[in-house]
Amino acid sequence: MEPSPDLLNRLFDAKAQRRQKLAAMSFEEKIDALVRLQEMSASIARSRGVILKPWSRPIAIS
Amino acid sequence: MEATLRVLNNLERQGVIGRYGIGGAVGAIFYMEPFATFDLDVFVVFPGSGLLVTLEPLYAALRQMGYEAKDECVVIEGVPVQFLPAYNPLVEEALHEARDVMLGETPTRVLRAEHLAAIMLQTGRAKDRQRFQGFMEVANLDPTLFEAILRRHQLEARRQQWNLPPIS
């Protein structure tokens, strides 16, 4: 069974809204998220034998 | 990253570098959703730079501070920083008009969204094109300013090449 166009539109709209929400975060929050993404990338890369070094996360984000 | 920015601010204060501004992926992240990147691109004006720009005085100052250059980057407080001299009028203008922002308690500068987009167009690599599309969707560019930058730096043809309509 294929998803309805209406469902797909809702999903794509939600995705676009999430991007806008993430884009509106503060610079501090974005750098914190960036370091988390680096940690995830580094862990995936490690399993392929590639060493990546995430930045440190000195800023406390609540 | 704040510690890295403090080092950059000290270098600027000491006159080792002139005005600097964050560009590249981290500059883009200032305006769009975060994505993974591992280095920090910093555009720099070098004081008294003539026709031949060398990074050696900067690298020497950083070495004295204990930061070694490696593969075109210098790892400063855990962050690989790539210093890019202002290499053409567009980048010079972008640096001149960069925005003063804060990261935590530390002041820094980020290139304006309109200049970052223009630099992506001008640089024109596959990854610039890919980033450009997403950037334009969320970065809320000022259309008047962006169009003026494209005209001033002869980038309208590139935009046409990329099949992008003028933003409204």
Image (cartoon, rainbow, N blue to C red):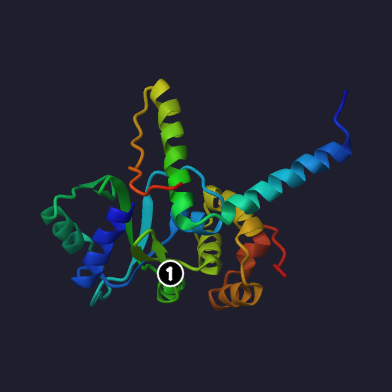
Q: Nearer the viewer, residue A7 or B114?
A: A7
Amino acid type at image mark 1: Val
Could you tell me which residue is drawn at 56 percent across and 75 percent down? B149
Q: Nearer the viewer, residue B138 or B63?
A: B138
Question: Which class describes the residues within 10 Å of circle 1: few (<14), some (14-19), or many (20+)?
Answer: many
Give percent across and percent down for residue B82.
32, 54
Query: To which quarter of the image does residue B95 belong?
Result: bottom left
The residue tagged with tag 1: helix, strand or loop?
Answer: helix
Q: Residue furthest front?
A: A62
Residue B99, above or below B61: below
Could you tell me which residue is drawn at 82 percent across and 43 percent down? A9
- Horizontal placement of B108 versus B60: left or right? right
Q: Nearer the viewer, residue B158 or B138?
A: B138
Q: In the rendered view of the protein, which quadrant contains the C terminus of chain B?
A: bottom right
Residue B14, above or below A13: below
Could you tell me which residue is drawn at 43 percent across and 60 percent down? B23
- Horizontal placement of B139 versus A1: left or right? left
Give percent across and percent down for residue B31.
54, 59
Give percent across and percent down for residue A41.
45, 33
Give percent across and percent down for residue B81.
31, 52
For label 1, the residue is: B91
Q: Chain letter of disc 1?
A: B
Q: How many marks?
A: 1
Residue A35, above or below B135: above
Q: Nearer the viewer, residue B127 or B63?
A: B63
